Amino acid sequence: VNHLLGIKYLTESDIQLIFETADQFKEVINRPIKKVPSLRDITIANLFFENSTRTKLSFELAEKRLSADVINFSASQSSVKKGETLIDTVNNILSMKVDMVVMRHPSPGAGVFLSKHIDASIVNAGDGAHEHPTQALLDSYSIRESLGSVKGKNVVIVGDILHSRVALSNIYALKLQGANVMVCGPKTLLPKYIKDLGVKVETNLRQALNWCDVANMLRVQNERMDISYFPSTREYAQQYGVNKALLDSLDKEITIMHPGPINRGVEITSDVADSDQSIILNQVENGVAIRMAVIYLLASKIK
Ligand code: CP
């Protein structure tokens, strides 16, 4: 059985195949009739054990654009609340003849764990602070679309690297494609093992922005913290938030990304988020084509 559990398990040529397939689907979803009949015989379960707006809707739309049958499961409204285990929950769903599972779960490694116990393809839609592979794919695809290629570009990931699955998946994906990667944030929000990942580390935002072609701004994930890692939200915004005045003071125009959800006025101000330098909504748009490509390629191995 084939899965997409993390970027860690992909090669550079896997990523190129996903991008070339996404190029075709992007053309399809911009046509008046946005659907293809490719997956009429495939049933997909979207299992969300953690909140989501973009990823959940994007996967559902991608599946429907491919003509798959789709069922949606939200843990908060399920029998998980009555004590049912993850394996029992998923095996009960699979007994209804489901071919593929898309899963978001708060525990790192939940997808890898499940893949050892079930007989269906699994797509990781975010597992705790571990990986969010389709986010990293759509991020790189958006850089490729905006700047022509990922190879050789200087990309800085700014913010709460310690608690971010987006950061780890992006680091793996960008490095596989030959980008130069930097992380920037307060020391308290950088993991101790960060240098082992082969990235540059910078604690000064201005220095980081002067170096980069692309800045991917992350949210501080307070929901993953037991204690406050940084003195205050205001201090974080002053030292690690991007605003238009700061961007205008740089020597060159850089591209601004954000995986969402945005905290306006904290890591990014509205005059940046809504500016021409921002490709935030392009990322969301590209997410559907990327997820169509991932599902299509996995399903072609099921059939
Ligand atoms: N980027 C992202 O994963 O957003 P959601 O949490 O809304 O899915």
Image (spheres, grey):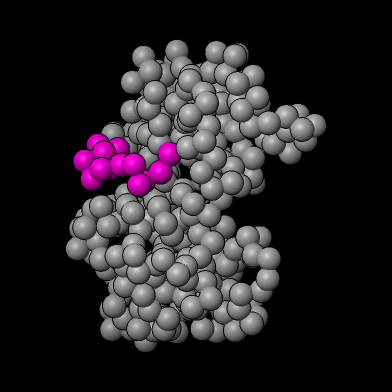
**Residue 211, above or below 120:** below
**Residue 267, above or below 26:** below
Residue at 51% from the left image edge and 23% from the top image edge: 118
**Residue nearest the observer in this picture, 214 or 97:** 97
Q: Which residues are magenta?
A: 5-20
Residue at 46% from the left image edge and 61% from the top image edge: 258
Q: Is residue 9 left or right of residue 257?
A: left
Asked if one can make out residue 146 in the rendered structure from this viewpoint, the answer is yes
User: Across the whole image, how many numbered discs are drawn on residues?
Assistant: 0
Asked if one can make out residue 72 in the rendered structure from this viewpoint, the answer is no
Residue at 50% from the left image edge and 78% from the top image edge: 186
Question: Farthest residue in the right direction?
Answer: 82
* Residue 36 location, quadrant: top left
19 magenta-colored? yes
Residue 140 in the image, given as x and y percentages of width and height? 33, 53
Q: Is residue 250 left or right of residue 278?
A: left
Residue 271 in the image, given as x and y percentages of width and height? 50, 73
